[in-house]
Image (cartoon, rainbow, N blue to C red):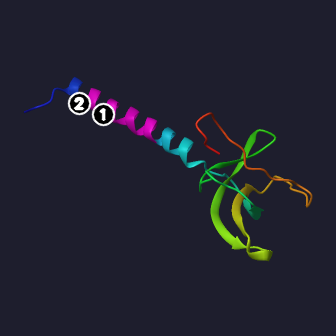
Amino acid sequence: MKLKRSQMVSLVGYCAVGAICGSLVFNTLAVPVRGSTDHYVLEFTDVEGLNVGNPVTLSGVRVGRVDAVDVADADGGAALARVTVEIEGDQVLTRDVQAAVRYGDMLGAR
């Protein structure tokens, strides 16, 4: 089976468009943090539904992502969730900053 020149050009164009679309979807879902970053460890009593890779927002703008979610022992036998986040280096966070885990959509994503 021999392809005509026009069929070959169409096939190459189709594959190129597919690769570009796949790259855009991957970058959107991967939640990349560009440039230099700082890592912070936050402690919460409840982080149900929070997953590695979830976006971190500051005043509604995405500035980072969740790197890890671990369990840490607290005083009195209680357990705390220790969340490691990666934040863009140009974002200044003060010592009195308060963090919260909120629902991101109607389906329960956080």
106 to the left or right of 11? right
12 to the left or right of 58? left
Q: Residues within 10 Å of mark 2 (few under 14, many from 20)?
A: few
Which residue is tagged 2?
Answer: 8
Residue 10 position within the rendered picture, expressed as x and y whole percent measured from the top left = 28, 26
Q: Amino acid at mark 1?
A: Val
Residue 44 position within the rendered picture, expressed as x and y whole percent measured from the top left = 75, 60
* Label total for image: 2
Label 1 sits on a secondary structure element that is helix
Which residue is tagged 1?
Answer: 12
The magenta stretch is: 9-22
Residue ranking furthest to the top:
6
At 86% from the left and 53% from the top, the residue drawn is 98
The image quadrant of residue 92 is bottom right
At 76% from the left and 73% from the top, the residue drawn is 74
The image quadrant of residue 88 is bottom right
Per the model, the C-alpha gap separating discs 2 and 1 is: 6 Å
Label 2 sits on a secondary structure element that is helix
Residue 5 position within the rendered picture, expressed as x and y whole percent measured from the top left = 20, 27
Residues under numbered marks 2 and 1 in contact, where contact means CB atoms less than 8 Å apart: yes
Q: Is residue 98 above or below residue 78?
A: above
Q: Amino acid at mark 2?
A: Met
At 65% from the left and 45% from the top, the residue drawn is 110
